[in-house]
Every structure is written in C-alpha cells, then in structure tokens.
Image (spheres, grey):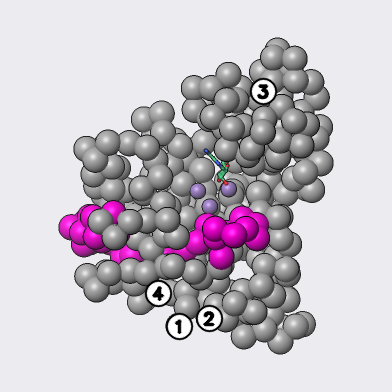
Amino acid sequence: MIYDLHSHTTSSDGSLTPTELMVRADIKQIDALAITDHDSVSGLQEAKQAITSKGLKTQLINGVEISTKWHGYEIHIVGLALDIDDDVLLATLETQIKHREIRAQAISDKLAKKGIENVYKDAKNKAKGGAVSRTHFAKVLLERGVVSNFDAAFKKYLGKGKSAYVSPNWMDIESAIKIIHRANGIPVLAHPIRYDMSNKWLTKLIEEFAAWGGEAIEVGLTQISPNQREHMSRLANLNGLYSSQGSDFHSPAKWIELGRNLRLTEKCIPVWQHPKWKTA
Ligand code: AMP
Ligand code: MN
Ligand code: MN
Ligand code: MN
C-alpha cells in the first residue's frame, strides 16, 4: 500500500484541480491520498466525485491543513479522516479564510510601499477562488520579474521578518486540535523538521501538541534525512503519537512526486492504524 497523506489542490495553493490530482494519484498507483488544503475542505467533494466518475482505484482520505500560531512560529496542523460537514469546522475555516484575505491586503500594501503595486488583485486571480496564500504572491512576484526564482520571493519579501511579512492572525494549536476532534478527525503535526527551530523548541512543541490531544506527527517526508527520520520517530514514540507520511505535493515538478520517497521507521505506528481511520 502506498499512502500519501499530505497534498494540495487549487482549493488552496496547489496547481492541479481536485480531479486532476486524483487522476495523477491513480496513475502513480497511490492507494490512499489525503487532500489537505490550507484552511479549506472545499476541494474534497470534487475529488470524491472524480473517483466515481472516472473509476479511479485511489482511495480518498478527507484532510485539511490548518494554519496556527505558536510563540511566533507558524505551525501547520493537519487533520485526517475528518467529517467535512461539521458546522464548527466549516465556520472556523471560514474565519481563517477571512484572516487570509485581510493578511493578503496587508501584504499587498507593504509591497506597494516598496513600489510593487496592485499585487493583491493578481494574487487573488491566481488563487482562482481558492484560499489566497503567500504562494500566489510569490508566483506574481516571479512573473513580474521582481524576483528571479520562487524561493527568492520568500527570502526577500514574504518570509518571516522580511519586508512584506505580515504577522498572521491564525488560531492557536489547541483550538485547531479541538475542531479536528469535533469533526472526528486525527490531528497531525505537519512537517516538524521544517520550522527552523532549535531541538529544544521542537521537543517542547511536540510535547505540548501531544498534551493538547494531538495524535500523530509527520515522519515520512520527501526531503528528510535518515537521521532526522530516526529522531522524529523517536519523538513520536516518546510522546505516544502515531506517525504519518506525505509528499506535501503542490504542483508537478522534478523534485517532488505523489507517494515518492515516503517511509516510516520500524518503530513507528502508522496513522492509518488509528481506530478512527476511514476513507471519504
Ligand atoms: P501561507 O499559508 O499563505 O502562509 O503560505 C505558505 C505556503 O507557501 C506554504 O504552504 C508553501 O506552500 C509555500 N512556501 C514555499 N516556499 C516557502 C518558504 N520559503 N517559506 C514559507 N512558505 C513557503
Ligand atoms: Mn502550501
Ligand atoms: Mn505546511
Ligand atoms: Mn502542505
């Protein structure tokens, strides 16, 4: 079984529609794919329909990636196998989307002060009705030739502490865990190795996440070293957490593919063994 439990569509900052992503997963022989758009579950219905209408073999797992704030860090909490019609979940995500709008305006204002005008409008167009994200801003800056590559947009303007960075108004981790639980889902700490924090902070993050009811962490990531994987699986076990794996696929590229290079260690208890596990 190939599990890929972290991916994005045009409902947030991915470039494939939910249908296109499901077709790709089927071609790549993924057995179970979780779609985990930023602060949105709006692509999941289309993805489910695509399975029926196109006769795909890939199973869909309902998912979401909620943006939270913790001690100045932006921490992503994935919810897996959740009920996407839960009213509190939907209302909370709507609030997050409003914060995204307000932040996008503020980012655009900061860019305008640097002489880069009207980026909000272009970023919104790129988002095509999905949740507007810094990814869309980076794409606009790249297209306009303001930066020479995608990462430079974050390094120069959009990243934490950079000239167009706007501190977001995300919910806290505990609230994200609560609403995922309310929707019968499994809260997963996303890509723990990517937060650019010391070991001490990371240990504290995982301990608090577990104490608040978090149930799994991502151990199988595309770009993780064997040492890091060992370390993460040890932290998972120490804190009584299941382990998850996912590519965080956003768009077709040479260096990333659905289901590629995702491995847990022998110590890990896979999140798909959780009693609450279910397909959409
Ligand atoms: P947002 O959720 O609007 O804050 O945007 C964050 C998204 O930008 C991430 O989910 C990534 O897809 C993308 N991204 C790409 N490069 C970077 C980077 N260097 N730092 C932060 N986000 C990045
Ligand atoms: Mn993203
Ligand atoms: Mn993330
Ligand atoms: Mn992601």
- Circle 2 — which element? loop
Q: Is residue 205 left or right of residue 158?
A: left
Q: Is residue 159 left or right of residue 214?
A: right
**Residue drawn at point x = 55 percent, y = 68 percent:** 258
Q: Give the spatial CA distance, label 3 vs label 1.
A: 44 Å
Kindly identify which residue carries mark 4.
272
Q: Which amino acid, mark 3?
A: Ala
Query: Mark 1, residues whose alpha carbon is within 10 Å: few (<14), some, or many (≥20)?
Result: few
> Can I make out residue 166 in this image?
no
Kindly identify which residue carries mark 1.
1
The quadrant of the rendering that contains the N terminus is bottom left
Task: Please tell me which of labels 2 and 1 falls first in the chain.
Answer: 1
**Residue drawn at point x = 32 percent, y = 36 percent:** 197
Looking at the image, do the residues carrying marks 1 and 4 touch, with CB atoms under 8 Å apart? no
Camera-near label (3 vs 1) is: 1
Q: Give the spatial CA distance, label 3 vs label 4.
A: 40 Å
Q: Is residue 57 above or below residue 91?
A: below
Q: Is residue 231 above or below residue 272?
A: above
- Circle 4 — which element? helix
Task: Please tell me which of labels 3 and 2 falls first in the chain.
Answer: 2
> Can I make out residue 150 in this image?
yes
Kindly identify which residue carries mark 3.
106
* Residue 244 belongs to the span the image colors magenta: yes
Q: Quadrant of residue 122?
A: top right
Looking at the image, do the residues carrying marks 3 and 4 touch, with CB atoms under 8 Å apart? no
The mark found on residue 31 in the picture is 2
> x%, y% of residue 214?
34, 55
Q: Is residue 63 left or right of residue 201?
A: right
Query: Mark 4, residues whose alpha carbon is within 10 Å: few (<14), some, or many (≥20)?
Result: some
> x%, y% of residue 237?
21, 62
Q: Which range is magenta? A: 228-257
Q: Quadrant of residue 125?
A: top right
